Amino acid sequence: QVQLAESGGGLVQPGGSLRLSCAASGNIFLIYDMGWYRQTPGKQRELVATITRAPTTNYADSVKGRFTISRDNAKNTVYLQMNSLKPEDTAVYYCNADISASVGLSRVYWGQGTQVTVSS
């Protein structure tokens, strides 16, 4: 059994910063790609940023230059540093990770989500 536990969400004023963390635990052999997604009511979940083991990163155009994704493989953790936050960044943020419990097959796991609200 694998679990992803997110933390770091909250209420912040426009222009402020937050750092999200997501730690994977359980029966883990190897973690491949990790990522952050977000969702607002009535809309589909959208990609925010992803990171490989290399690591190489990929960002949505809307967050480039403001958000930074990173990972600590020793801690099985992925981070999202969010700077210059805007009201339109308000959403529930979800982390995901492609994890194998043994050599060979892997599957994608999701965290439970953490609310980020940007408002004055």
Image (cartoon, grey):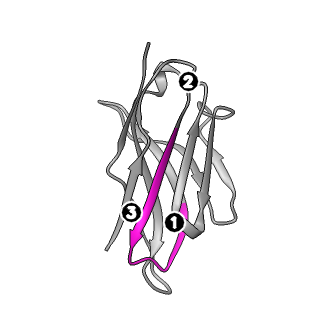
Labels 3 and 2 touching (C-beta < 8 A): no
Toward which corner of the image does residue 63 lie, by quadrant?
A: top right
- The three-letter amino acid code for the residue at tag 2 is Gly
Residue toward you, 42 or 119: 119
Q: Secondary structure at mark 2?
A: loop
Identify the residue at horizontal 69%, vertical 57% (top origin).
56
Residue 22: percent from left, percent from top:
45, 54
- The residue carrying pointer 2 sits among few (fewer than 14), some (14 to 19) or many (20 or more) residues within 10 Å by Cα, namely some
Residue at image mark 1: 76
Mark 3 or 1, which is nearer the eye? 1
Magenta: main secondary structure equals: strand
The residue segment tinted magenta is: 19-33
Residue 108: percent from left, percent from top:
42, 64
Q: Is residue 21 magenta?
A: yes
Residue toward you, 107 or 114: 114
Identify the residue at horizontal 68%, vertical 61% (top origin).
55
Whether residue 60 sits left or right of residue 45 in the image: it is: right
Residue at the far top: name it.
120
Measure how far apart labels 3 and 1 are at the Cα level: 13 Å
Identify the residue at horizontal 42%, vertical 80% (top origin).
101
Asked if residue 3 is positioned above or below residue 20 in the image, the reply reads: below
- The residue carrying pointer 3 sits among few (fewer than 14), some (14 to 19) or many (20 or more) residues within 10 Å by Cα, namely some
- The three-letter amino acid code for the residue at tag 1 is Asn
Q: Quadrant of the N terminus?
A: bottom left
Measure how far apart labels 1 and 2 are at the Cα level: 27 Å
Residue at image mark 3: 109
Residue 65: percent from left, percent from top:
69, 33
Which label belongs to residue 16? 2
- The residue carrying pointer 1 sits among few (fewer than 14), some (14 to 19) or many (20 or more) residues within 10 Å by Cα, namely some
Q: Secondary structure at mark 1?
A: loop
